Image: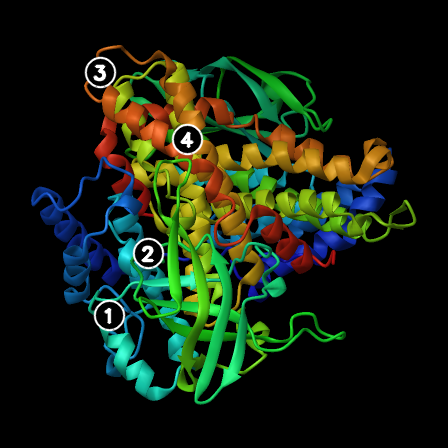
Amino acid sequence: MTAALRFDPIRLPPKCEELRKEVRAFLAEEIAAGTFSPFKPNREDTDVPAFCRKVGERGWIGMTWPKKYGGHERSFLERYVVTEEMRVANAPTRRFFVADRQSGPVLLKYAPEHIKMDILPRICAGELCFSIGMSEPNSGSDLFAAKTKATKTDGGWLINGTKIWTSSAHIADYMIALFRTSPPTKENRRHGLTQFLVKMKQPGIKVNPIGQITGQFEFNEVVFTDHFIPDDHVLGEIDGAWKQATSELAYERSGPERFLETYYVLTELVRAVGNNPDTRSAEGIGRLVAQVHTMRRMSVSVAGMLHAGKEPVVEAAIVKDIGTVWEQQLPHRVRELAAFVEEDIGNRETLEKQLSFAIKTAPKLTIQGGTTEVLRGIIARGLGLR
Amino acid sequence: MADSENIVVETAEKIFADLADVQGVTSDKAGAWKAPLWQALAEAGLSLSWVSEECGGAGASLADGFGVLGAAGRFAIAVPLAETMLAGWLLAQAKISSPEGEMTVAPASPRDRIALHSDGTLSGRARSVPFAKAAKHVAVLASGADGWSIALVDAAKLRIEAGLNLANDNSDTVTFDHVAPIAIKPAPKGFDQTALMLMGGVVRSLQIAGALESMLEISVRYSNERVAFEKKISKFQAVQHNLARLAGESAAALAAATSAADTVGDNASFDDDAVFLEAVAAKIRCAEAAEKGSAIAHQVHGAIGFTIEHILHRYSLRALSWRDDFGSESYWAVELGKRVAARGADELWPLVASR
């Protein structure tokens, strides 16, 4: 077979279900205490440092990392359960989620020991927020066109240039960024970029908020002017970032956050139609539930393969492709199905507010973290077409 | 399912490759391939995979049988293998021994009913019964005054009006008019027509997923051979992205079907919301994938894939037809939606997360 895709029926082990109960109980307490509302999906506007520290105290950040860095040496499947329960509850995880999913694993792999000892335990404690400096005004999906320059100076590097669409940069303590240390070569246009750890809120860094169509100011322009970064903040090989960028991507692409972003509108639709729906509503809900169940089974299958040490790169890209397209379409399907619900249903206002937010959020879901077009290119390569 | 390490599945794949090569089958207008294929499958015990040895079968596990059905889908097998396996499984629920030869099941749609009279005879009409014309016996689920019964019926006693599905396989209307069964026993407690339809749905889901795997494979291969505008069509981004979407649909079907098979293989009962979700979601999602996936496979192949000589239709038309058997995706979506609504909004995520 040219294209033997694998999606074995992997199940989460029983100890995950105990953990799930703990997470649900914790979230119920926080909701009861008024920390956040599960009905308000604009999580990204909600920055709740105290909540993050509590999640850290529970041991749910950096769950899979070594204990000596503050981690908990638990399995990737246990992390999966925490992630999906937080997402479905609309918990305000933005402050720690990027560090937990992406930045921490990069530091674990490439940072010098003293930096790991300094930063990773604070991530695990829920104290640090990370952002990712990839896109620039003239390089988005084409990562290797990045121009922001790192120039060698005494004991470190001077950074000049602009990163853009950088989520959470305005609250972030650190950024992991790609800067140009050499020009690309004729043979390898990916050559010449280096990964750096950037300490934010320092001289030479200016963060300018950018308004989004949702009304949020969640991403930013970050301008570097002769910003100094010490040598020990280089992550990995100088000029060789292109070799480092790939292995974590399967984790990043296949998690529950790649199909549950707008899930709340489905819950609210079920509430709106009541216990005895008409045929049209029942069919619509049935299809959506079948689809989300299938997405989750695919995502858990990839998590299980990653847990077993396999590298399901194409399978992970497929999960993100069809998962993000699904969560993008979901609010529109729910809107259609809600067209005939009774005028006086109790949750009409909640549903309408949620739909309005989800429909405005929807366009970004197939852009952020790798566009649909990039993902389909990766799948096509896996199929042997490129 | 670890197909490559499974001797039962390997045996089936070898027989399919030797005797049901899709190109050979497509060119053989007279259907001479059917008899030797059936004979080999029966001799290998595959047609009665799910029947215990004391009931005359091979006594393979449900998982092994499901693996065989996935392979049958990959080869677009058009003899009543799945139907005979399902019939043997149904009879085994009531410990009725399976006879030799082709079988099918009735009813094959959730809305048809066969009635058991107090004199022990059966009446009713079952539509769209796959391969009834080819079957020597029919395994029947009938409802009587005392609940559900399972019966073995001689096909010669039935009125069978031939029909054809999209792929020109028999899909027949079977009428029971006070027919006396060869054997009849009460169904086990909790076993009802929904259980039979769910099992049939999982069978069809695996076949659809298998057919989609093959459609992906032959479409990728063709795109790497066919030249247009002076390059292989696989080099056009529009074609690449269509094939990536086909891979996604194939993957979704495979994940949903194998997950449902795994669930059914692990559970004795169908009377459970989680089993219902798994089985029904597989049928719905595989049917949706059949539509989207076969459209892309045909698009990639262009006019050649629309010809009777080409092998593509053997997969695409079967996958589209299999959507209709044992309850369509529309039927099951309504049933699933009703069940979800009855449980209530806050019980939806716990149900999904329980799988």
Chain hosting mark 2: A
Mark 1 chain: A
- In the image, A332: left or right of B68? left
Nearest to N terminus: mark 4 or mark 3: 3
What residue is disc 3 on? A345
Please name whichever residue, B154 or A285, is drawn nearer the observer in this view of the structure.
A285
Q: CA distance from mark 1 to mark 2?
A: 21 Å
**How many marks on residues?**
4
The residue that appears at 27% across and 21% down in the rendered structure is A272
Mark 1 or mark 3: whose residue is earlier in sequence: 1
Q: Position of residue A189 (x, y in %)?
A: 69, 70
Residue bearing mark 1: A124
Per the model, the C-alpha gap separating discs 1 and 4 is 34 Å
Q: Give the residue pinned by disc 2.
A: A170
Q: Is residue B36 left or right of residue B269?
A: right
Indicate which label's residue lies in the foreground, 1 or 3: 1
- Above or below, B95 against A257 in this view is above
Residue at far left of view = A33
The first of marks 1 and 2 along the sequence is 1
Residue holding disc 4: A359
